[in-house]
Each structure stands twice: as C-alpha cells, then as structure tokens.
Amino acid sequence: MQIEQKLIAEINARLERQDANGGNGWASARRLAAGAFEEMGLPSRRSEAYKYTPMTKRVTEDLSLENSAGVVSAARAFDAIEGLHLSTTNGLLDSVPQDLPEGLTISSLVDAYEGNRIFVNDHLSRAFVAERDAFSSLAAAAAEDGILIHVAANVKVEQPIVIHHDSVSASGLVQPRVLVVADEGASLKLVEHFGKAGESSAFENRVAEMIVANGGSIDHVLVYERSENATFVNGLHVYQEGSSHYATNTITLGGGMVRNNLHFLPDGEECETHLNGLYIARGTQHIDNHTFVDHAKPNCESNELFKGIVADKATGVFNGKILVRQDSQKINAYQSSKSIVLDRSASIYAKPELEIYADDVRCSHGATTGELDEDAMFYLMARGIRPEKARLILLEAFARDVVDLVDQEAVKEYLYTRLHDILEAHAS
Amino acid sequence: MLTIKNLHVSIEEEGTEILKGLDLQVNAGEVHAIMGPNGSGKSTLASVLAGREDYEVTEGSVDFDGEDLLEMETDERAREGLFLAFQYPVELPGVSMSNFLKQAVNSVREHRGEEPLSAGDFLKLMKEKAALVHLDPSLKARSVNEGFSGGEKKRNEIFQLAMLDPKLAILDETDSGLDIDALRIVADGVNDLRGQNRAFVVITHYQRLLDYIEPDYVHVLVDGKIVMSGDKDLALQLEEKGYDWIKAETGQAV
C-alpha cells in the first residue's frame, strides 16, 4: 500500500491547497473518488478485472502527481481533416479556440466551472462511477483540470472536433479529465489522436465522460499510437438518455501497456450504442480492452465489434461484458471479438460475459481466436500470390473491417496506410 | 505439358492412400476429362497438382513443362502457369476483387518478366474478361466470392482463369451446383479460352458438362487409378451404363 498512501497524501495536499486558495473546484466529487481509490487500492494480481494485465506494476515508486518532466511532442496526423482543431499538452488545451459555431462551447474544465458551477456539477461524474475502477478513481481524484466540450440543445455541429493530444511529459503521471456533453437533440463528432510522442514513458491515466441527452448523438474515434515506453489507462464512461446515439471506435496501435476501460450506460429507451475497436500489439506490447454495456432500460440496441492482431511477444486481452437488467425487455445486443495470433510467443485472452436477467431479448456473442485461415491462404497462393503478400492481404482485410466503420474519411485513409505499414513487417 | 507417372498420394494426417499409381499425359492444346465416382480421388488429384498441403505424395512424379511440379510451392506453380478452378471457391471478406486480381495478375506478369499492368490497362482487361463469363463489371468493388451466388462463384473462377492466362487449367467439378444456363455460360467461357498453347483437365462426376466442353480424351478414375481411357464417346457410354459397367469391364471394385 506504500504507493497508494503516497498518492493519496499528494491528492489530499492538492485539495487542501485549493481550499486555501478559496476555489475548491469540484472538490466533493474528487474527495469521493479519492475515498473510493483509498478503499480499493491498486488492483493486485488476484484482481479479476486486471488478471491478465499487471497494470499496477507500471505504477512505480517514482511516480508522482507533481510531474516536472519536460514535454515531448508528436507529429500530427489528422491536420487534413476539415474540422475544429484543438491541441493539448498533458491532456489540457493549449489554447481555447475562438469563433466557435453557435451553441458549441469548448473550454478548460476549470474555466467552465468558474462560469457555470451548476452545469459542471450536474454533469461531472454523471457517467463515471468512482467505485468501478481504481485507476479511474485515482484520475478523478487527482485531476485538477481538463477539457469541456458542450453542444447546446438541438445544435448539430457538422465539422468534427479534432483533438491532437500531441504533447505529453517525457515521463511521470498524467491524469486529465474530459467531459463531453451533447444536450437534447444535439450532435457532435469527436476525433482524438494520441500520436507517438518520441520515446515518452508517461503514464497517462484519464477519465473521459461523454453524456448524450435525449435524442442527441456523439460519434467518437480515438487513435492511440504512443511509444512502447508509454502506459495508458483510458477510462471512457458514456451515459445515454433516451433515443440517443453513441458510437466509439477505439484504435490502439501503440503503447507498452494499454487498458481501455469502456463503459456504457444507455439509461433511456430507444438508445443505440456502437462500440468498435481494433488493436495491433507487437514487440512486448500489452493491449487490453475491457468493455461493459449496462442495458438498464428496455428497447435499446448495442453493437460491439473488437478485433486484434498480436505478434512477437505481445499480449492482447478482451473482456466484454453485457448486462441486461431484469426490466430491460426488447434489447438487441450483439458482440463479436476476433483475434489473430501471428506468433507462438504472442498471446490472447478473450472473455465474453453475458449476464441477462430479462427474458425477451436478443443477444449474441461470438469470439474467435486463431491463425490466418489456411483455405484463404491456399486460394490466394493458387493465384500466384506469394505467401508473404497473401498474409498481408488477409491481415489488412481483417483489420480494415473495423476501420471501415469510422466515418471520417481522412482518419480512415490514415489508418489504412498505417495498418499496411505495420502489418507488412509482420506478414513475411 | 503435364506428365504424371505412377502417382501415389495419401492423406497427410491419417495416411489413407487415395491415389494408387496414377498415370496421365496431357499435351498442349488438349482437353482431358477425368470422370469417376465419388471418392475415386478426382478432387485429390486436383488438390495435389495445385499443391495443397494436406496430402503427401509417397511415390511417383509429376513433370510440368520440364520441371518437377512437386518441388514447387503452390504460388510458384500458379506463376509457372498452372491454374486450379476450385470446386468450392473461398470467400475472402474485405479483399476486393480488383485488389486480389491485381496482385495475382502482376505476380504472374512479374514472373514472366513483364511490367505490371497500368491501372487503365488492368481495368480494360478486367472488363474484357468479365464479359466472357457474363460477370457484372461492378464486381470489382466486391469482396472476393463474398455474397456471390453458386453460379457467380463458378463463373468467377473461369474469369480468373481468363485473367491469369495459364498454360494448364484444371477444372475441379466446375459443373457442380450449376443450372443449365450457368453451365452453358461457364462452358462457353472455357471454349473461348481453348487454344494451341493451353491444356485443360476437366474433372467431373457427370457427362453433362462434356456436352458443352468437348474433350479430346476421357479417362475414368476408379479407386485412385485410371482404369480406362478413350475419346468423348467413353463419356457417353459411362452416362448410359453407369460406373458399375466399369467395374464389370475392369474387374475393379467401385
């Protein structure tokens, strides 16, 4: 518990310092999260949720909330997108954009809080449950600032909002918060890119909450490409009111150890939830996708597709839980996870979990793990195509299936190229 | 072009012998039909010639244009000019027909010392060859064989044959599952591709296909060996008298 105690002491010191300065931010929510973190502690090796992902090992003694390491910047990949471009350093906005379309607010969370405490208090921690995950609780307790994106009722922001998370500490803990709110009937598209920021070994542990009000819509794409030294815990917590639409596509190509904690609560009828993801783990990378869809209300639909390719000594983990509560009738929930293991030294742990308490539902899940299809290889080679080329064709087709679901053309094109380059090295 | 001598083949894992000393000589320009009852080894022959790994050649030799075919990998055989039209074409979700064919055609061209086709020439070639078997040119954007009807899959095999321009084409039960119209389209496509420099080995259970693709030779394969050879009339006799007749004629168990 030494590390936990040290971190909690730092969190308390921060909270006290803020109290002394008069502004206490969303202090009560942070204290709640700190309490939950203290209670849970970092997950041990016996923890079911982190059984295959020893994330706690990455929380080393020298990690501190007070991070003084210099900043490293990544090359941008999504400049070509026609949209509203934002950049961050350690998850905080470098500057607040001017001339935003009417009804769209983008600001730092602290500024938003100063401007409208009620709004921030109402929405912050609406999707996030402190007791659920120790890393998210830690981030929620520690984060002093973050980003707010808010679209007012019935406003449809056509241009995608692109966040280039291009600058990050060379090392240390980085724990920002993100709050995205689409009010009733509002819609927005969000693209996030975590580019390869040199050899930064930062541990990014974030809490992102996305709240979609009645009839609203959020489309989200996240592409993560940090170096093999980097660690990422991506806590994404989605709350949906009735007749809303939410889609995320989480593409993980980088990082030494990555855990995507993706939680969805469609808390109204006629909700549509799409959760798709792709990861390619090479070298000694370890990539874990943990998804949880909590069907709390009837007449909703969720679609889930996760695909992974592991090579070398890498590890892939998928755990997909779908909970259909007793009164949630007429739920259509589909889950599919597919993975390809390219080398004997690589491994995959996949576990679908369906917990269904309602009786009038349609739920299905399928999980496959294996090598490339031999019949498909033979067919390609029988047409004169060399085996290394045939493997590349099949791997690209496998991975592109997920990328095809991204609705931003420029993101798709970028990913097609990246997939080709990455997979080419593993096809021969 | 193809000389098979005393070919013995077993299933790799269980060791059951399927081909038990098969001999066949195919020259350029010829069309050979191989007929036989179920389980006689017809499809095994096709698979072994194309290089499928589930089989083990225990004895015999296969010479393809002066080279030892059995020493070559599947993709080398294809580049050398051997084409197998699959009985069950494989679906490749996410692999577009145009990408698939571009890779295949350019692999073969490179092997022949030819430049890769330009995008324009490639499209022209696709259009021309697709017309041979009445395939809709819009298929180029579709995934290989995915969502194709049974007839479309078989026509697609002949389309690929036309695109790759092989020396030797082996048609493995290309007629199975085809209605009479589709059969005629496939057969017309094959007949268009017949020529002095190209040979065909047509493997079929029924004589029906041979009404449309007229063979120069007909061989009857029973229990892993060719037990009778003749001209196209042999196929008609078989159709009339059934495979039991062969049994009586040759003393083979069918």
Image: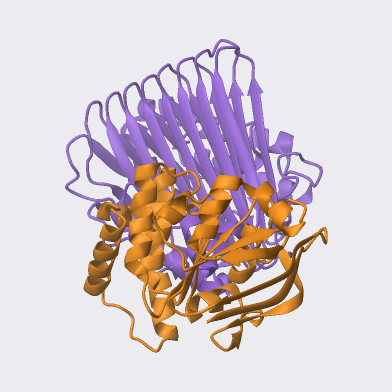
Query: Toward which corner of the image does residue B246 lie, by quadrant?
Result: bottom right
Query: Toward which corner of the image does residue A185 lie, by quadrant?
Result: top left
Apparent colour of chain B: orange
- The colour scheme used here is by chain
Where residue A173 appears, x then y in whole percent? 58, 56
Task: Give B135 or A185, whichever is nearer the viewer.
Answer: B135
Q: Is residue A145 among what the camera can see?
A: no
Quadrant where the image shows the C terminus of chain A: bottom right
Q: Is residue B214 left or right of residue B131?
A: right
Q: Is residue A374 left or right of residue B157?
A: right
Query: How many marks on residues?
Result: 0
Compared with B200, A315 (above or below) is above
Q: Is residue A216 left or right of residue A17?
A: left
Where residue A395 appears, x then y in whole percent? 52, 61
* Image point (26%, 69%), residue name: B125
The residue most toward the front is B249
* Image point (36%, 21%), residue name: A243
Where residue A222 appears, x then y in whole percent? 43, 50
For the colour purple, the matching chain is A
Q: Is residue A306 among what the camera can see?
A: yes
Where residue A15 appears, x then y in whole percent? 56, 40
* Image point (50%, 47%), residue name: B176
Compared with B29, A180 (above or below) is above
Query: Toward which corner of the image does residue B5 lie, by quadrant?
Result: bottom right
